[in-house]
Image: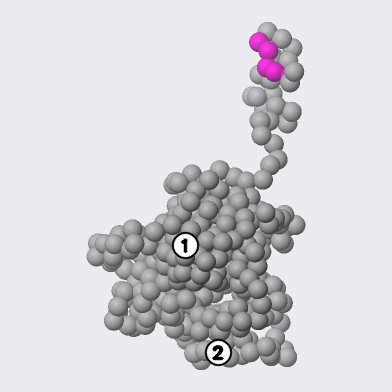
Amino acid sequence: MAVASRANSDYGRFMDEINGMSLFPLWERVGGLKPGTKCVPAHWSYDTVRPHLMRAADLVTKKEASRRVLCLENPSLRGTTFICDSLFAGLQIILPGEVAPSHRHTPSALRFIIEGEGAYTAVAGEKLPMKPGDFVVTPAWAWHDHGNLGTTPVVWLDGLDTPFARFFGAAFYEPYPQDTQPLDRPEGESMAVYGMNLIPDEFVSDGHSTPVLIYPYERTRAALDSMAKAGKPHPAHGFRLRYANPANGKHPFPTMAVSIQRLPAGFDGKTYRSTGSAVFAVHKGSGTAQVGEETFKIAAHDVFVAPPWSPYSFRADSELELFSYSDRAGQEALGYWREQVE
Ligand code: 1HN
């Protein structure tokens, strides 16, 4: 029998005394070390969320909101703004003519463009026009502002590693003195200079974030097309590509790994799990995601989250493309990463 607190015993008096001294006996701990967190599988249908984004755009000015974002909060993490223990996810809407003022923060951020054209993000002095399916990088502590020069609302998914910065007590934020930062690098530079399998000889990576600030969908699609032509889909992941930091072949962020996968129509994938928490955004197509005990019918622009060590699998009704980001980069750096295919 485990040692239990016994009233009027030496052990009971010992427990009472140490309790008042900020001491706790490890042998009394319940649970111990096991994979997983209280994060639960969750799914947000775009059809359901979109009208509320539009309402937010009506009700709240950009001036009031600075970033007009609806946070996708895990049902088990209400009040945190987080979609899982290690990641933030939110849907941001920006209307024609609006500017989201420049600022910077220690958390790294990514954007995955959901709908609308004509918006840009300016990152570290470079203006990055964005189209649906593009993945845009905002490295830690880089100045960034957004604008919509088009004629329709633009919506994107914001993915951040804010929980990491919070965990370490290193969450800094600074507004830029003006609404927009000076654009002192030519448009398209990061792609033209770093995204062509050539790196300037004198370039020294900071070892953290990719120098390529945008991964346009046009190129992603071409790469997926080539991959799908060349071989067989992975039994769980289909045709899956990882967005790479060309400076080291690793991940675009120190914390987050980012991927895109294509599941051909009729694909019925094996079950997979990893220690990573992963956020998925459906770029196109429809099907089913089985995540833990939950079965989600998924369609274009939906977002869902797979908790750590929770088994998941996909079925594609039509050709399905899933963008995703996870805390894999951080876990690999720390030696925690594990994965299993069924
Ligand atoms: C942020 O700076 C943006 O710049 C979006 O668009 C979402 C969520 C948490 C903290 C900072 C943005 C954010 C954010």
In the foreground, 63 or 130 = 130
Write down the region rendered in magenta: 3-7
Q: Quadrant of residue 336?
A: bottom right
Residue at image position (70%, 27%) is 28
Residue at image position (61%, 51%) is 311
Magenta stretch contains residue 94 = no
Q: Residue 287 carries which label?
A: 1
Q: What's the amino acid at mark 1?
A: Gly
The reply to whether the residue tagged 1 has its Cβ within 8 angstroms of ligand 1 is no
Q: Quadrant of residue 100?
A: bottom left
Q: What's the amino acid at mark 2?
A: Glu
Q: Most extreme residue toward the top, as rendered?
A: 8
Q: In the shown orientation, is residue 48 left or right of residue 299?
A: left
Question: Taking the image as drawn, is residue 302 in sight?
Answer: yes
Locate residue 32, reporting x and y percent.
Answer: 69, 36
**Who comes first in sequence, dot 1 or dot 2?**
2
Locate residue 330, reporting x and y percent.
Answer: 66, 61
Quarter placement of the N terminus: top right
- Dot 2 crowding, Cα within 10 Å, few <14, some 14–19, many 20+: some
Name the residue beneath numbered marker 2.
Answer: 189
Residue at image position (63%, 50%) is 309
